[in-house]
Amino acid sequence: MTAAPVVGVPENTAERYRAAGYWVGETFGELLAARAAEHGEREALTGGDARWSYRELDERASAMATGFADLGVGKGDRVVVQLPNVPEFLEVVFALFRLGAVPVFALPAHRETELRHIAEQAGAVALLTSDAHEGFAAAEAAVRVAAAVPSVRHRIVCVLDGRDLTEGAVDLAALRATARALPGPAADDLAFLQLSGGTTGLPKLIPRTHDDYLYSVRASAEICELTRDTVYLVALPAAHNFPMSSPGFFGVLHVGGRVVLCPRPDAATALGLIERERVTFTGVVPPLAALWAQAAPTAGFDVSSLAVLQVGGARCAPELAKRIGPALGCAVQQVFGMAEGLVNYTRLDDPEDLVVNTQGRPISPDDEIRVVDDNDDDVTPGEIGALLTRGPYTIRGYYDATRPDVAAHNAASFTADGFYRTGDLVRMTPEGYLVVSGRVKDQINRGGEKVAADEIENHLIAHPGVLDAAVVAMPDPYLGERSCAFVVAVDPDAAPTPAQLRAFVRGRGVAAVTVPDRVEVVAAFPETGVGKTSKRDLRAAVAAQLREEKP
Ligand code: OOB
């Protein structure tokens, strides 16, 4: 089934991106073949008990591409892929790339509702899942999703948990056929669909081409100074844009380095793998950085190989950014990116002030950045506004724009001249670095008096007993909304009390509106699929709590 047309850039813009050397006409399949020719027996990746060389990964991808073709999966067909961090993930993805079929990257944390939505939006012909992971019987969920989504013709199962195949499913292992030459995709074809990282609502599908994505991969590898000696730990789910391309495992494979797949990102597992594999580079979301930094000094692992820890995906409070480097003995890099495209990095030689207090600057000189007010007019430089962006690796529309719901969403998410409305509030420093101050609607409206959630969070995180804070609005009969702060303590057995925390914030000399109305100390925050704090779930939690407390 051919893929729906993707909202592309105007042809003269595409020409400009080619002339500038961003879009070089290479596909992922060609990239892997070239690296296999170059690096052959060097180790490309390790995960579980497997260690695959570049040659082995390349051969496996070709063999599996043939298996997919024999099954009837062809160029342009969408295949939902839901796998945890196992070597088969890379084998499958490169196989689909080589064939010109289009992986749709579900996260391991997605469940039936999300999987059905993703399969429907993509018009997927196949679902490729584990039998079960993290206690989730994915193959059984796939049976129900396939029954509900008429385009789905195949269910393919990667057996990780030793379970019997579900009725009618194909064993992934059986797709390893004898490779034969297959016609591949063009570099400006749709390469895959990735999911939007919103912390509200169901995910949207983001269409990326070989040309645009590989540009971001190559440029990221250069900015992050990756070399053949880089050993990169995939700590976040491999299907997410951050560990995939910023610079991620694709960046590492591009330079001939080594990829280590981490099955779970808890401190013991991750720090253990950093020691065992002599990992030099990895990236995590801020809550994980906080956990690792807290655990490292006493966990007893030798993490001296680690040169860079990237933090991104959600706002990293300056207080946390300051703590990480000393705790882990490495440099810190902030990464502010989005699956829709634009990625910003602090540079490895930046002064500490920029690394701690900003979220970096764009990859490309041709990333266009606008910071605007409610009327889409540019704010005075240095003021906070909404971030709009356009550039050589940022999409112009979600997939599939022939669907009315998606077309309506595209009209709201992109300007008429093709800028993506990121929904992020930022300000730009004189050096051209971005500081993210929150989401466009992440504020508490206290009877008309508004306060940004991140402002309250900053004050709370400054308390030495606070590991992390997340502030949301809670309904209030008088003011409409009041603020509720959720707090995770550094030491759960000696957590500061709500009264102490309110007094602490008040003591910092702030307006009354900035003192949280309610404070809940919790063991951990609910998370999105990639481990970002889910404010949607926190809002629901406090609303439910309030209903219960009503006399
Ligand atoms: C990354 O991608 P997504 O698509 O999961 O989420 C994008 C959104 C951004 O619009 C922003 O709201 C938030 O996540 N975000 C940050 C941030 N990095 C992402 N907010 C504050 N500070 C940061 N450093 O999350 C993503 C993609 C590529 C690289 C890194 C992260």
Image (cartoon, rainbow, N blue to C red):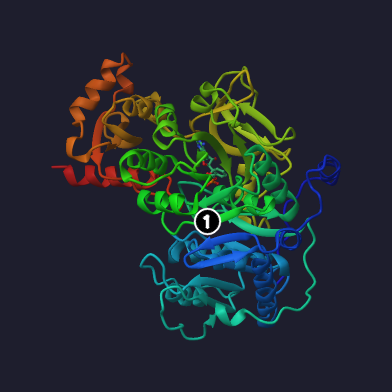
Question: How many numbered marks does the figure carry?
Answer: 1
* Residue 420, x across and y down, in percent: 64, 40
- Identify which residue, 241 or 414, lies in the foreground: 241
* Residue 332, x across and y down, in percent: 50, 34
Q: Quadrant of residue 95?
A: bottom right
Q: Hey, which residue is sitting farthest top in the picture?
A: 509
Left/right of residue 488 with respect to residue 327 in the rendered view? left
* Residue 296, x across and y down, in percent: 36, 41
Query: Quadrant where the N terminus lies?
Result: bottom right
- Identify which residue, 202 or 273, lies in the foreground: 273
Q: Is residue 528 visible in the rendered structure shown here?
A: no
Q: Quadrant of residue 341?
A: top right
Q: Quadrant of residue 383?
A: top right
Q: Hey, which residue is sitting farthest left in the picture?
A: 551
Q: Is residue 243 above or below residue 193?
A: above
- To which residue does mark 1 refer? 260
Q: Is residue 388 above or below residue 186?
A: above
Q: Residue at x 38, y 42 (%)?
A: 292
- How many other residues sit within 10 Å of disc 1, few (<14), some (14-19) or many (≥20)? many
- Identify which residue, 221 or 468, lies in the foreground: 221
Residue type, numbered disc 1: Val
Q: Hey, which residue is sitting farthest bottom in the picture?
A: 167
Left/right of residue 231 with respect to residue 502 in the rendered view? right
SS type, badge 1 = strand
Q: Residue at x 26, y 28 (%)?
A: 517
Query: Quadrant where the C terminus lies?
Result: top left
Left/right of residue 127 with respect to residue 459 in the rendered view? right
Q: Is residue 378 visible in the rendered structure shown here?
A: yes
* Residue 370, x across and y down, in percent: 66, 29
Q: Is residue 64 above or below residue 372?
A: below
